[in-house]
Image (cartoon, coloured by chain):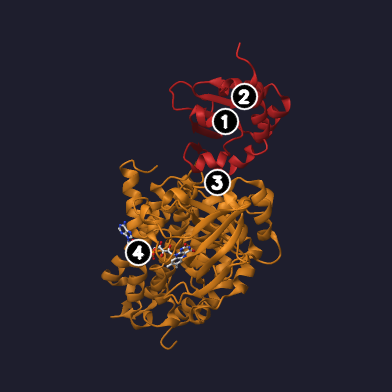
Chain colours: A red, B orange
């Protein structure tokens, strides 16, 4: 089952450690799927739908299916880029700062996607 | 060096001069003028260090290296460049690298190429080889292949695409179905067995490991292309003859033969069949830095011509006072500025977009490669007979200006990339 970015990062930001790591690095992420109106902005301040309140550090353009494969741990982030299923805009050097956040994202994604839908 | 004044002698040897060099004056005017492109402080620092390295370490050895046998290699320059961090420019700072990105590499390579394009390519080709490991995002692969660049002794890498039967067939998407009889990778046991012959591989003779593009057996053309990291001391690897090139003589272009070379599955980058996509992404970054090399070649030739025209007196006035020469000098200078602006823009894009776009880097290289040939040829003609003699350095720039027009995309390859982007076939 797929989990949308709002739910995923909402759950992640409930973890103080994850939020602190975003804050320490000054990282904000903007997920933009092809469907209009479905963009989600994530920063240590919270998760918001729609236009970002300030310019994001990194903007991720990808479909829900690609996101699902990445967060499920089946598709390495850089493979998604190489296969042109994911475009990242923003300082490329900062993409590396996501590396140690990924395990937490994937773990939370696995947990949420295993939950029965209410 | 008969007939040369102290100043022109200095141009040739780079040793004695009181006149400001173009780099000095350009740096002064750049500092005084507002610019859209303010280099980040770490890139400015790198540029200044590389400029000094090029002046003090590379320049005194240029002529000797150019005249040396085609398979001689100057490890001393590489060793000193390594001390400066040129082999770890793109490695992240947390790994001990300089972490400068495409912009930093481009600016550094322009500085080197303004003195010696071959030296620029020795470092550039190594960074290109490294790029597969860095872009893999695979910590295990990085842990095995990155630390070598951080040790006391220099380690070089290389990147092997070209084959006897396939040059542009491995670069132009429309050509790729014809890349049939290229290096193959057969799945076997816990890895792959590589067989094939790569040609003209810069650093192939001296590198420790190589990024190799090979087709999975039974999957010819772009679909099966896969990227492997291959240590060159692997059993079955033979380093073949070094090409006797008309320019770029200080960097060695070598045949690499792979005969039943076993490569572990852990050395595959981005998985099976992703080689073409990675190659495209890699080229889009590399074209920016090669555009910078061509810009440097043009600048190096121009610096000699500018100085010469400032002091060579014919018909009672320095050459630059003759309107024909003035027009030429102005055109040359503007072409170099334009080439630099194009590559700076492409570098900015490549540092802020993954994957890097096609248009900007291809356009920058298409333009810079062309103007390098035009400017170098014009500079050589401005020195008259002296331009035709090796000791005045300028003819080397002419020979080298033709090199970058071949690697990382010929004008035809680049034109197809640019129009592909214009018509929406390529991102
Ligand atoms: C200094 C130097 C360094 C190099 N370093 C490396 C290296 O490190 N690694 C590596 O792999 N290779 C390297 N090369 C090789 C280089 O990348 C190739 O030579 C280049 O890709 C062209 O291939 P080719 O020589 O086989 O020419 P070909 O592919 O045979 O092309 C010959 C001509 O035909 C044109 N052409 C081909 N197809 C088309 C088409 N569809 N439409 C229009 N025109 C077309 C080309 O533009 C070219 O003008 C290097 C070359 C040089 C000169």
Determine whether B413 is above or below A51 in the image: below
Q: Residues within 10 Å of mark 4 (few under 14, many from 20)?
A: many
Q: Are marks 3 and 1 on the same chain?
A: no
Q: Label 4 vs label 1: CA separation?
A: 44 Å
Dot 4: chain letter: B
Residue B103 in view of the camera: no
- What residue lies at 62% left-to-right and 74% top-to-bottom? B76
Element marked by disc 1 = strand
Q: Nearer the viewer, residue A67 or B283?
A: A67
Figure quadrant of the N terminus of chain B: bottom left
Q: Nearer the viewer, residue A41 or B190?
A: B190
Dot 1: chain letter: A
Marks 1/2 in contact by CB < 8 Å: the verdict is: yes
- Residue beneath disc 2: A9
Q: Label 4 vs label 2: CA separation?
A: 54 Å
- Residue beneath disc 4: B332
The residue sitting at the right extreme is A17
Nearer-N-terminus badge (3/4): 3
- What residue lies at 53% left-to-right and 53% top-to-bottom? B227
- Residue beneath disc 3: B271
Element marked by disc 4 = helix
């Amino acid at each position: 089952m797929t989990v949308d970015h709002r739910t995923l990062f909402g759950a992640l930001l409930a973890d103080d450690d994850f939020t602190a790591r975003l804050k320490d690095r000054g990282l904000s992420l903007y997920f933009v799927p092809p469907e209009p109106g479905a963009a989600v902005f994530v920063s240590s301040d919270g998760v918001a739908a729609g236009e970002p309140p300030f310019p994001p550090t990194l903007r991720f353009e990808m479909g829900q299916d690609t996101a699902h494969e990445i967060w499920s741990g089946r598709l390495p982030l850089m493979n998604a880029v190489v296969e042109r299923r994911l475009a990242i805009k923003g300082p490329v050097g900062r993409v590396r700062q996501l590396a140690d956040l990924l395990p937490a994202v994937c773990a939370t994604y696995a947990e949420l996607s295993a939950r029965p839908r209410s | 060096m008969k007939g040369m004044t102290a100043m022109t002698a200095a141009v040739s040897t780079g040793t004695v001069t009181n006149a400001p060099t173009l780099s000095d004056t350009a740096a002064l005017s750049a500092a005084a003028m507002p610019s859209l492109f303010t280099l980040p402080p770490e890139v400015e620092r790198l540029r200044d260090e590389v400029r000094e390295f090029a002046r003090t370490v590379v320049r005194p050895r240029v002529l000797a290296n150019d005249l040396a046998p085609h398979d001689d290699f100057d490890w001393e320059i590489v060793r000193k460049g390594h001390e400066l961090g040129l082999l770890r420019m793109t490695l992240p700072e947390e790994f001990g690298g300089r972490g400068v990105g495409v912009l930093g590499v481009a600016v550094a390579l322009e500085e080197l190429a303004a003195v010696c394009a071959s030296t620029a390519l020795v470092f550039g080709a190594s960074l290109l080889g490294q790029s597969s490991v860095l872009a893999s995002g695979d910590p295990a692969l990085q842990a095995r292949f990155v630390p070598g660049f951080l040790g006391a002794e220099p380690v070089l890498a290389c990147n092997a695409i070209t084959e006897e039967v396939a040059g542009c067939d491995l670069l132009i998407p429309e050509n790729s179905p014809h890349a049939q009889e290229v290096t193959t990778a057969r799945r076997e046991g816990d890895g792959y067995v590589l067989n094939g012959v790569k040609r003209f591989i810069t650093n192939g003779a001296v590198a420790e490991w190589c990024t190799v593009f090979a087709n999975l057996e039974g999957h010819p053309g772009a679909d099966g292309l896969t990227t492997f990291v291959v240590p060159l001391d692997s059993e079955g690897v033979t380093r073949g003859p070094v090409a006797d090139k008309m320019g770029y003589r200080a960097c060695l272009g070598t045949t690499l033969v792979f005969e039943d070379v076993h490569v572990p599955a852990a050395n595959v980058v981005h998985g099976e069949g992703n080689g073409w996509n990675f190659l495209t992404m890699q080229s889009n970054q590399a074209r920016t830095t090669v555009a910078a090399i061509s810009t440097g070649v043009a600048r190096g030739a121009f610096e000699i011509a500018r100085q010469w025209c400032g002091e060579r007196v014919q018909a009672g006035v320095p050459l630059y006072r003759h309107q024909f020469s003035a027009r030429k000098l102005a055109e040359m200078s503007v072409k170099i500025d334009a080439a630099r602006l194009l590559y700076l823009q492409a570098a900015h894009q490549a540092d802020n977009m993954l994957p890097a776009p096609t248009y900007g880097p291809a356009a920058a290289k298409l333009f810079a490669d062309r103007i390098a040939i035009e400017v170098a040829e014009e500079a050589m003609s401005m020195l008259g007979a002296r331009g035709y003699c090796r000791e005045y350095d300028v003819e080397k720039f002419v020979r080298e200006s033709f090199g970058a027009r071949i690697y990382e995309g010929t004008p035809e390859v680049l034109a197809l990339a640019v129009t592909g982007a214009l018509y929406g076939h390529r991102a």
